[in-house]
Amino acid sequence: MKLAADTAHCDDLMTALEGFRDYAAPVVRRWGTSLAERLGTGARLLVAGNGGSAAQAQHLTAELVGRYRDDRPPFSALALHADTSSTTAIANDYGVQEIFARQVAAHGRTGDVLMLLSTSGASANLLVAAKEAQRLGMTVWGLTGPAPNPLEGCADDSLCVDAATTATVQELHLVAVHMLCESFDRAVAGRVPPDGRPADRDTEGGT
């Protein structure tokens, strides 16, 4: 009986994976190409999530600032929860719902991307951040659980994972993060200038 319970999680994951590649691949390919164009000309990726989604967000930014597989230049990507002093100060002074929105207002610029990860797609602090990002002229992407959900409804583009449990959604979010990194690296390979550094946003038309 215990063995059946232990393997049920694997069964859920395998079921969710069956169609994941087909609906996820076009989205992550689109996102990877867009990020290569934007970050290559000096734009920035801001990423946010709560709990396990915060860990996934930081995983993504680490792959972009560091590297995914092969060596390449670093690109600007910030996980907004990672600055614990700012996050806790904002929560204390302005409320938990503002912890990401206020950082978006501080760091985001027109042409940047805000990527929000949420298994429910209903986290209030992410929805407030999405609204602030769009006010600034940023593009908002949502990586969520099953649609429909509030974040999917307000983001400019979304990848909604169809899975039965939160744990399986989080696991497929990690798959999506790695697919995005692979797509980004492929797209950026031919766009890096001869000096091996991304173009400066102030000299290449970024804002």
Image (spheres, rainbow, N blue to C red):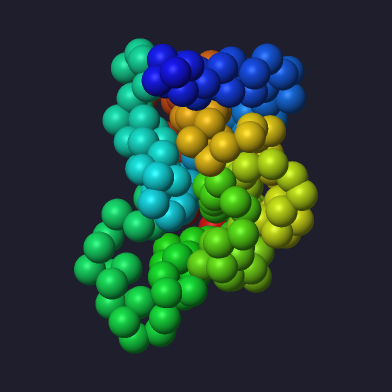
Query: Residue 88, how many percent across, how many down?
Result: 28, 72
Q: How many marks?
A: 0
Q: Is residue 86 left or right of residue 165?
A: left
Residue 169 to residue 206: above or below: above
Residue drawn at (58%, 23%), measured in percent from left and top? 12
Query: Residue 81, how many percent across, how many down?
Result: 35, 57
Residue drawn at (69%, 41%), measured in percent from left and top? 146
- Quadrant of the image containing the C terminus: bottom right
Residue sticking out furthest to the left: 85
Q: In this view, does 126 lie to the left or right of 149?
A: left
Q: In this view, does 82 lie to the left or right of 51?
A: left
Residue 73 to residue 75: above or below: above
Residue 175 to residue 98: above or below: above
- Quadrant of the image containing the N terminus: top left
Residue drawn at (31%, 82%), measured in percent from left and top? 92
Q: Name the quadrant containing residue 75.
A: top left
Query: Residue 18, how many percent across, how many down?
Result: 68, 15
Q: Name the quadrant containing residue 157.
A: top right
Regarding residue 136, the answer to whether it shows in the image is no
Regarding residue 207, the answer to whether it shows in the image is yes
Residue sticking out furthest to the front: 1
Query: Residue 98, how many percent across, how many down?
Result: 46, 75
Q: Is residue 66 left or right of residue 4?
A: left
Residue sticking out furthest to the bottom: 93
Q: Nearer the viewer, residue 25 or 187?
A: 25
Q: Nearer the viewer, residue 109 or 199?
A: 109
Residue 102 to residue 11: above or below: below
Q: Which of 13 and 189 is in front in this view?
A: 13
